[in-house]
Amino acid sequence: MDRLIVTFDSRQALYMPAGHLVDIDIRDQIGNFDELEDRALADHPRMRRILVRPMPHWPLACFYLHWSSGEDLTILDSLVRSGIATQDDFANAVLGEAIGMTCMECKAQLRVVTWSPALKLFTDSNTRAQSHSFKKKCPVCHHAWTASVLEFIDR
């Protein structure tokens, strides 16, 4: 796969369109890479994977761009491949990161993509999050929670 670079403000990211797995030659350079998650989320209809360095001289890290407003991400993939995607094409996305979490009610161990405000990819991250749809209940016990979960990861 050709390396698809997208620039967010001054930060560059390697964009992974639907169906493309992370190249084997860079997997060992990604601090939080999980091959099973990469395969499970490669064709997700509301997310795209990006690789970015959180800080200069740090290893690459895998993050997820998530949309909850119904965008056709195949169009975005085409725009990125063509080199004509702009910041506006990412206007409704929030940044997420895969983590493990435990439901405080039923103690289920879950793997999720959660909103990641720590990496300032977008200058308006907090505003974006306020209008974004999050998963409001545990998928096991259906108890309500306040975690900022974007998606559950099925492996």
Image (cartoon, helix red, strand yellow):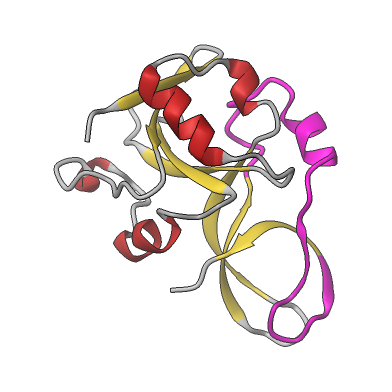
Q: Position of residue 16 (x, y in %)?
A: 38, 39
Whether 121 is among the magenta residues is yes
Q: Nearer the viewer, residue 154 or 74?
A: 74
Q: Is residue 82 left or right of residue 97?
A: left
Number of marks in the rendered image = 0
Q: Where does the N terminus fall, quadrant-wise?
A: top left
Q: Is residue 22 left or right of residue 96?
A: left
Report the predominant secondary structure element of the magenta stretch: loop
Can you say whether 91 is above or below 45 in the image? Answer: above
Location of residue 53 by image quarter: top left
Looking at the image, which residue is at 84% across and 39% down? 131
Location of residue 40 by image quarter: bottom left
Q: Where does the C terminus fall, quadrant-wise?
A: bottom left
Can you say whether 56 is above or below 104 in the image? Answer: above
> Quick check: can you spot residue 12?
no
Q: Position of residue 105 (x, y in %)?
A: 78, 83
**In the rendered structure, which segment of residues is drawn in magenta?**
116-145
Whether 98 is among the magenta residues is no
Looking at the image, which residue is at 53% across and 60% down? 99
Q: Position of residue 50 (x, y in %)?
A: 43, 37
Can you say whether 58 is above or below 111 in the image? Answer: above
Can you say whether 36 is above or below 90 in the image? Answer: below
Q: Is residue 23 left or right of residue 49?
A: left
Q: Position of residue 2 (x, y in %)?
A: 23, 29
Looking at the image, which residue is at 27% across and 28% down? 3
> Quick check: can you spot residue 68?
yes
Location of residue 69 by image quarter: top right
Looking at the image, which residue is at 71% across and 47% down? 68
Q: Nearer the viewer, residue 84 or 63?
A: 84
